[in-house]
Amino acid sequence: MATKIALIGAGAMGGAIGARLVRTGTALSVFDLDQQKVDALVACGATAAASGADAARSASAVILSLNSPRIVDAAVFGPEGVAAGAEPGTLIIDMSSIDPTTTQNLAARAKAQGLAWVDSPLSGGIPKAATGELTLMQGGEEADVARAQSVLAKVAANQTHMGPAGAGQTTKLINQVLCGLGFMAVAEATALAEAAGVDASRIPQALRGGRADSALLQEYMPRFAARDYRRTGRIDNMVKDLNGAQDLARLSNTAMPMTALCAEIHRMLTAAGLGGEDQAALMEFFTGAGNPLPNSNKDAV
């Protein structure tokens, strides 16, 4: 029989991870408070669970894809949470993006209950999950990380063990600093190209292979130029991550002036009602935050 894996959290990112696992032959048990999200994965071939504890029973590993430290804590250690149903030695893989300190505390609590914990936040978003090409940065004990990498091999093309518990989350914060600043740079450059009368959609091809080239440039400048606001991420999630990076910087007295500016712009857009929109809606900063988004797919994930 196939090894059973449990998934807690079937939102936009968790749903994409779950769908990829099921399509590639994983026996998946899924729990989410939103039954429609569970049903979507059941339609793909997953099995619905009545609770986190139910999902974790007889599972060799439990994947978490949740929105905040509080929710992760409750999903694992709350009533009918994962810890209530998991067998000793069960591996918990937290693919949520939460702070390193909370992760270290959660990992210690899990170990005290005979469970293994690996933090494995991701980069690449829904498109890369669908093709099994996520980039994962991982923290935990070496043997546990090796197990996690085996479980996640079907969804990831690049997995790196960064150190003990929390190291993966620290690396994710650094990733988000680079992404947040990169999104802003590409959006600003798009606005300049448009103002100067250059077709911004042709710039990625013109710069391909040069020093300014990047995955963000290739994916997002055409989207910025087309005002393509399909949702593959959320501006308010970037606020959360940039807040986390700033909190980490304060602990080490690290100056991060560009990150501070980037965070403030994201907060402005969130306050203007665009927090649930994709990063492509950063163009609204240049055209008037809060404008209607005529090209936004409001029904998209």
Image (cartoon, rainbow, N blue to C red):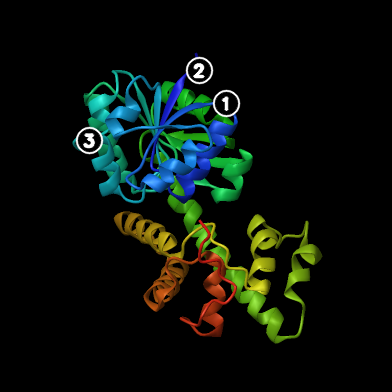
Residue shown at the point (54%, 71%) measured from the top left? 281
Query: Is residue 121 visible to us here?
Result: no
Q: CA distance from mark 3 to mark 2?
A: 27 Å
Residue shown at the point (46%, 65%) measured from the top left? 235
Residue shown at the point (59%, 70%) measured from the top left? 185
Q: Position of residue 164 (x, y in %)?
A: 38, 33
Q: Position of residue 187 (x, y in %)?
A: 60, 72
Q: Are marks 3 and 2 in contact (CB under 8 Å)?
A: no
* Amino acid type, mark 1: Gly
Q: Which mark is residue 77?
A: 3
Check the image and name the residue furthest to the top.
Answer: 1
- Classify mark 3: helix, strand or loop: helix
Q: CA distance from mark 1 to mark 2?
A: 8 Å
**Residue 169 sits above or below residue 116 on the image:** below
29 vs 226, nearest the viewer: 29
Q: Which residue is mark 2?
A: 2
**Residue 39 placement, left or right of 68:** right
Q: Which mark is residue 199?
A: none
**Residue 59 placement, left or right of 233:** left
Looking at the rendered image, the disc whose residue lies closer to the viewer, 3 or 2, is 2
* Residue 73, quarter of picture: top left
Label 2: few (<14), some or many (≥20) within 10 Å?
few
Q: Which mark is residue 25?
A: 1
Label 3: few (<14), some or many (≥20) within 10 Å?
some
159 vs 174, nearest the viewer: 159
- Classify mark 2: helix, strand or loop: loop
* Residue 143, quarter of picture: top left
Q: Are marks 1 and 2 in contact (CB under 8 Å)?
A: yes
First-in-chain label (3 vs 2): 2
Q: Position of residue 289 (x, y in %)?
A: 47, 81
First-in-chain label (3 vs 1): 1
